[in-house]
Image: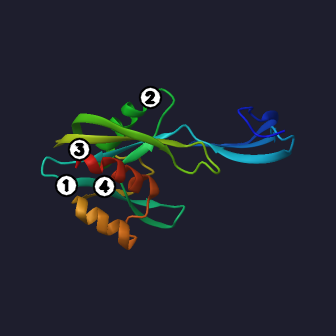
Amino acid sequence: MPYGGEPPQLLRRRFTYQGRKFSFESTRLRLPNRTEGEWECVRHPGGALAVPVTPEGKLVLVRQYRFTVQGRLLEFPAGTVEVSENPEETIRREIEEETGYRANRWQKLGEFFVAPGYSDEIIYAFLAQDLELLDDPPEQDSDEDLEPVLMTAEEIEKAIHTGELADAKSICAFLLAQPHL
């Protein structure tokens, strides 16, 4: 039977791990061609990311320690979408916590999957403009170790090409923001 619009048949679904930010699922499927197999997937509620631009045209990033790579990565501010939030609420909160800025103008840039080969995580990207530095910024989350970094678009391009900026979600969002910078 040739492949068409027919979806695979779910035979079994097991959640083998439920964590604070994601879960791990093992699924057995029968494909339209009658082949059966096991697929694993990281289930994630999604994230929101901002490309913040100061009135002077500088972009605000954060240098953040990431235990998974045992080092600091240069990234745009981002956070996991909480159960009671929509992505815009998430990033409005995160940008203030992570950078100390508030954006007065927002524009959705798009959305994209981070690694669809093994995860359903989606990132909602926003352009944050008309920034103002907060007099009394909120406390950073206790499990975060980060510092804000201001860069020009040209400096970011160079950082991407040298490998200093190697975070895929930030690179993708920067490309989406290009027409607006």
Q: Earlier in the sequence, mark 1 or mark 3?
A: 1
Q: Tell me, yes or no, if residue 47 can be seen here.
A: yes
Give neighbour class at mark 1: few <14, some 14-19, many 20+ (Cα, 10 Å).
some
| Alpha-carbon span between mark 1 and mark 3 | 13 Å
Quadrant location, the N terminus = top right
Residue pointed to by mark 1: 58
- Residue type beneath disc 4: Leu
| Alpha-carbon span between mark 2 and mark 4 | 23 Å
Mark 3 or 4: the one toward you: 4
Q: Are marks 2 and 3 in contact (CB under 8 Å)?
A: no
Mark 4 or 1: the one toward you: 1
In which quarter of the view is residue 97 placed? top left
Residue pointed to by mark 2: 85
Q: Tell me, yes or no, if residue 19 can be seen here.
A: no
Mark 1 or 2: the one toward you: 1
Name the spot of residue 31 as percent of width and height, x first. Answer: 80, 40
Residue pointed to by mark 4: 61
Residue pointed to by mark 3: 101
- Residue type beneath disc 1: Lys
Q: Earlier in the sequence, mark 3 or mark 4?
A: 4
Q: In the rendered image of this protein, does residue 65 appear above or below residue 91?
A: below
Q: Secondary structure at mark 4?
A: strand
Q: Are marks 1 and 3 in contact (CB under 8 Å)?
A: no
Name the spot of residue 111 as percent of width and height, x first. Answer: 44, 40
Front position in the image: 32 or 173: 32
Name the spot of residue 125 as percent of width and height, x first. Answer: 38, 42
Q: Are marks 2 and 4 in contact (CB under 8 Å)?
A: no
Picture residue at 76% right of the left edge, 47% below the top:
39
Front position in the image: 103 or 152: 152
